Image (spheres, rainbow, N blue to C red):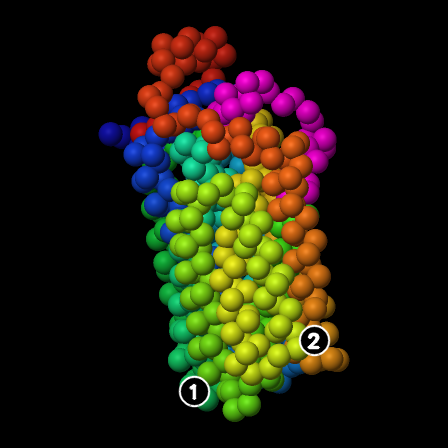
Amino acid sequence: MGAASFFKARSLKANDKGRTKAAELTLRESIFPIALVTVLFFLWGFSYGLLDTLNKHFQNTLHIDQARSSGLQAAYFGAYPLASLGHAAWILRHYGYRAVFIWGLFLYAVGAAIAIPCIKAKSFGGFCASIFIIGNGLGSLETAANPFITVCGPPKYSELRINISQAFNGIGTVIAPVLGSYVFFNFSDERALQNVQWVYLAIVIFVLLLATLFFLAKIPEITNADMEFQAQEAHGSSDDKPLWKQYRLFHAALAQFCYTGAQVAIASSFINYAVATRPGTTSSLGSKLFAGAQAAFAIGRFTGSGVMRFVKPRWIFLFFISMCIIFICPAITQKGNTGIAMLYVVLFFESVCFPTIVALGMRGLGRHTKRGSGFIVGGVVGGACVPPLTFVAAERHGSGISMVVPLSFFIVAWSYAFCVNFVPAYRDVVDAFSDTDIGTQSHSNDEEIAEKVDHEKPVVTTVQ
């Protein structure tokens, strides 16, 4: 194979107007692409867990208060809507999923590389700028990876697939604070900053290698025509409303904003909460306790995924987010081990909420699937808005009372869980996709697809 043929076979350009067999991928056919994309979930889980640990580390080494240190979260999550509604969304619509994966990894590597001299110069502002670039990279990855996992394979298992993939995200969030407790807090400030530089250098190398793998790999491109086909098959007719009339989508985006804001607020303030409310707790011990909480989060994802095999995901979502509301209340008034234990339980029940909102919110969008996913992922900007409010409340009223802020946002997110279970206009669309047999049986007749392709004259990407 010549160089021209090699690069042509790995073209990043996909035609969204042509339907491919990717609309009906079976479980067996979807295993490899899902496994490859799941690596990305681990990657940003690690980055997210590292960010929460660095938050406390910079408070110690640069002598900044909690409110100012929340600039890391603001830079990280503030980049998400710029990616999910801007550059990454444009690339996704005009090129395809692989192109966004490679673009996101490239931005991640650039941001991690810039972080190294900023850390050496002890520039908190410079590090926030590098985190903003990393956030753009990870926002790009989430813009493509979440919908890809949701639509790659039988639609009836989409919530199960994305929760399993997100469980590896949870594993990344466990490893990062454990690493932080040994690398950042057990050394002098000067040595700790050097260790952070090596961590980011390793990230640069790994991310660039992963981008190369995505360029070489052959994974299916799932087009708008494929999504329209799935919507027609599930509903029996196509929902042709314009994007701005997809009110279920925007409710899901609001729920994602509020839920993510609450989740990030709890995670980013966990170490401060432990140090402030549990006598004798150091930052290093607080980081280890936070790793345990993230382990509860990861266990919750695997547990929730297993239960979804037997219970409708919408019911699991309602139960889990209701438990978040119930168990965060004691953490407001209780202190020490009791309060920390309550936050452990909250993180366990947070586990399935984010991916399930993504999967449920994308149900029935058809040709709007790629654009719609950008709005849901863009809701992650809540992670930039809610933590500063929580930190200000902690500075003024104490870490315990500050938990009222994420509680309020959990309640707003709960409204979406209520609607998908009890409002027919929400529930019927979700259940239609849960009951469809697309991907669980043999593909549609190949001659029918070929006839349609010849009529429409697109360039079709087939499943390798």
Structural distance between the alpha carbons of marks 2 and 1 = 32 Å
Circle 1 SS class: loop
Image x and y of residue 8, in percent: 37, 29
Mark 1 crowdedness (10 Å alpha carbons): few <14, some 14-19, many ≥20: few
Q: Residue at x 37, y 60 (%)?
A: 205
Does the stretch in magenta take in 220? no
Image x and y of residue 324, in percent: 58, 61
Image x and y of residue 10, in percent: 36, 33
What secondary structure characterizes most of the magenta part? helix
The residue at the far left in this view is 1
- Looking at the rendering, the stretch of residues picked out in magenta corresponds to 224-252
The residue at the far right in this view is 396
Q: Which residue is drawn at 52% across and 81% down?
A: 337
Q: Which residue is drawn at 61% across and 53% down?
A: 380
Residue under circle 1? 187
Q: Which label sits on residue 401?
A: 2
Q: Which label sits on residue 385?
A: none
Please say whether residue 456 is visible from this viewpoint: yes
Image x and y of residue 224, in percent: 53, 27
Q: Which amino acid does label 1 sit on?
A: Phe
Marks counted in the figure total 2
